[in-house]
Amino acid sequence: MRIVIKGGRVIDTANSLDGKQDLFIADGKIVGLKKEPEGFESDLQIDAKDKVVLPGLVDLCARLREPGHTYKATFQSECQAANSSGITSICCPPDTKPVIDTTAVVDLIHQRTRNANRTNVYPLAALTLGLKGEHLAEMDTLRRAGCIGVSNGLAPIESTEVLRRAFEYAHSCGLTVFFFAEDYSLKNNGVVHEGPVSTRLGLPGIPETAETIALSRALLLVEQTQVKAHFCRLSSARSVSMIATAQEQGLPVTADVSICNLHLTEMDVADYNNDCHLQPPLRNERDRKGLIEGINKGVIAAVCSDHQPHDADAKAAPFSQTEAGASTIEHLLPLMLHLVNRKEIKLEQAIAVLSSQPANILGIDKGTLAVGSDADICILDLDSSNSVDKASLLSAGKNTPFKGWELPGQITHTLFNGNVVFQQD
Amino acid sequence: MSDETDVKQLISEMVTAIQSHTISNNYAAPLMIGIKTGGAWVANRLHQQLEYKDPLGELNIAFYRDDFSTLGMHPEVSPSQLPVDVNDRHIILIDDVLYTGRTIRAAMNEIFDYGRPASVTLAVLIDRSSTRELPIQADIIGKTIALKAGEHVKLLGPEPLTISIDTVRNTGTQNTG
Amino acid sequence: MTGNKIQLDKNGNLKHFLTTEGLSQSLLQSILDHAESFASVGERAVKKVPLLRGKTIANLFFEPSTRTRTTFELAAKRLSADILNLNIATSATSKGETLSDTLHTLEAMHCDMFVVRHANSGAAHYIATQVAPHISIINAGDGRHAHPTQAMLDMFTIRRHKKTFENLRVAIVGDILHSRVARSEIHALSTLGALETRIIAPQTLIPKDVENLGVQVFHDMDEGLNGVDVVMMLRLQKERMRGALLPSEYEYFQRYGLTSKRLEKAKPDAIVMHPGPINRGVEIASDVADGERSVILQQVSHGIAVRMAVMAMTMGRSPEDSGDKK
């Protein structure tokens, strides 16, 4: 299959490229930019006039709910949803059921990925067995089976000794640790940010220190063990400055943030909006601004969807009885563009944190349009907009906190390995 | 239709009628109860002129209305006041206008929730004839008025007491008299 | 404003009573006025009015509480409603049957009102969003969030003694962090125009940023009680001693227990309140609880009148007000 994408504005932050040019694809690879390769004859021409051509987006964290939670969602449903917003590479955390601590689970995920044939899926291996925070998982075996890094998901590692050993061992295996910083005892059954809203609603609060204390413990151990660490889902401004300091000291640390924390605050929880029950919690406006600033200063290198599709029952209960998480994968890019329209983030930066930078964190050759790379591409119409409607979500999880939001940008085409996997009606 | 002298005249006629009614029935020391708000105004004057020793009782029948589920709570409900035990007493129940009979039904229900009176005599200032929806008649009537459809009679007060007749649009179930 | 949108129908009448927050002063005053009328019903030979005859009220208690349930039951009976008591252990709902299933089952039994008590904050609010439009919800306590009828009976008691809320200084003493009563009282006092609401407790029992609710925080009891008109004591749950919130009952009583000596700091005519049940010698000394300044037993009897008022107000709305009610 030979495809030419004609007349689009091509933005490739990996190669500092931004300009109108044609893009040529053959046999699943990008074979030419601007200049037509000799003897190229296209089977398909895609007109990208007045549109933006981007590398397929890389989502650092999305739950595809297989294995174990197929009543919530499946690879098939979620990869389609991902394609509709230009995502072609997904990193998934190990908190499946069973947990990704055996090669059998990794094999199953690879098989599901091949069957769906719409996205690359990069599983993270469990850092500790069963994510219980007690014994090390077989990290190297899991790495050889295809895991791209190690993580304990959202589960705590209470013992600092275990954490130290896990970091040391991961470092020995050359694996990046994807670490979610939350102190279990300070969280203390909390469900929202500890602040005026938790006080008013009478909901148990999660103090900011639950994150910052866990983060400082982990940073000290990174310094000691020299493990490459990626800090997942920062929620507070204070954490951003702690990461910035660590980076200035030369520690091998990166960080990401969930798209929800860039748009919503504790105020959105008011009236017990179960769709805003998230982990980490939505904090205050100062934190939200601090996270945005973290992106603009390059401290936070990636924005992920932190997609967590849920079945209706999971959200049908009093707030603290509901499961945390939001269905966001379809709106990752539109929500970033919304920040661009509001002049909080520059377009180039918004694209980098969704493509080249998360690819760098994962160490994968994605998020680029360089000649020779896989033809994972999306085409974006910046001029159209859509309002978020729960019922018309492609994801099996309808739990979006952005119901009714008018969001800019519409993906018109998504290509995966040179095949069109999504096309706007 | 009416001026104050008219109401005064009706009230003094009612005083006489009540006196002769209680004497002929042998009602010793009757207890007077007025239905809020208009009935209580009338009762107040009757009570003064009859010089009853026991204080006047006042009933607010809001909690006993049969149209609660359609009309809801009355915005201002001041409680009933029955300062004297009603058990074995002869009650003179006073209202301003007797219309459908529903208010009197509610008032009697309420009185019986306070105790078991020996008898209840009903006295009204105005009887709108031929409008009854319940088998209730007054023993003593100040004046009987026949109104045309759409006309509405109302006692204005407390000072001075006057009777007014308006043409009002029929708004359906109104708990009047 | 929590609950505001959902609590009122489109004519501004009370449809559900979930929280005191966000309701207008005139609405809160009208609850107290109605309660004043209903208070006299309890003093009669037949302690019953036929107002809610034919209506069915379900007491849905997901968290056990005999006291509160009993006063709601009595209030419903005095209004001539039929009442159904359902104690639903939370374990039963977590085993398969969801909360929505439970609610829809009760709807099918043609209940008109649910009185809900639940261990989770926001439960009554959630239930109000789930039920058919003709059903009214009264919150009988949800987690740490709200206990609006308790707060209103306390306001009723204060109004009876102090006539007006203007110029009143009120101190709420004890476990504010876990107290739904305190939160509802704070909102009600501020709406009704109290001059100052103080909370007195150690930092461990005070929720973060509580000043945003318009209260003054005191850690010292004598300082906090100085010149107040009303002292509202909160019950201290024994399980608070198990964690790291407080060292011991003894020390708590020494520092925050209400004794007659401490009460001297308050105004000479200050009243002492407690939502009950009392822990004598933990938050309050027996001689104060039983003393002449104590209005604790009055609170209990006022509870029935206030609950009658709220039940009558939420159920007695014209059909066009309540959506698609037949």
Image (cartoon, coloured by chain):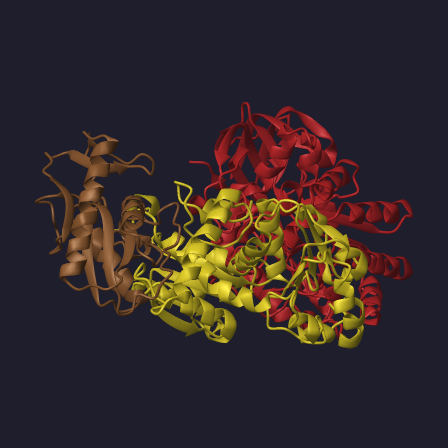
Chain colours: A red, B brown, C yellow
Q: Nearer the viewer, residue C241 or B149?
A: B149
Judge from the rendering whether residue B81 lies leftward or rightward of residue A131; answer left or right: left
Judge from the rendering whether residue A246 lies leftward or rightward of residue A306; answer left or right: right
Residue B107 visible, this orientation: yes
**Quarter of the view holding residue C297:** bottom right
Q: Is residue C233 above or below residue A240?
A: below
**Quarter of the view holding residue C113:** bottom left
**Quarter of the view holding residue C223:** bottom right
The structure residue drawn at horizontal position 51% and vertical position 49%, both measured from the top left corner, is C3
Q: Is residue C89 above or below residue A54?
A: below
Q: Is residue B33 above or below residue A338?
A: below
The structure residue drawn at horizontal position 84% and vertical position 45%, both measured from the top left corner, is A244
Provide residue B9's location: percent of width, then percent of height. Answer: 20, 38
Q: Is residue C28 above or below residue B153?
A: below
Judge from the rendering whether residue A234 lies leftward or rightward of residue B138; answer left or right: right
The structure residue drawn at horizontal position 49% and vertical position 34%, both measured from the top left corner, is A386
Total count of labels: 0
Image quarter (top left, top right, bottom left or bottom right) of the C terminus of chain A: top left
Provide residue C247's location: percent of width, then percent of height. Answer: 80, 73
Residue furthest to the left: B130
Provide residue C270's location: percent of width, then percent of height. Answer: 68, 58
Q: Nearer the viewer, residue B136 or A25?
A: B136
Provide residue C108's location: percent of width, then percent of height. Answer: 30, 64
Q: Nearer the viewer, residue C56 or C142?
A: C56
Residue B101 visible, this orientation: no
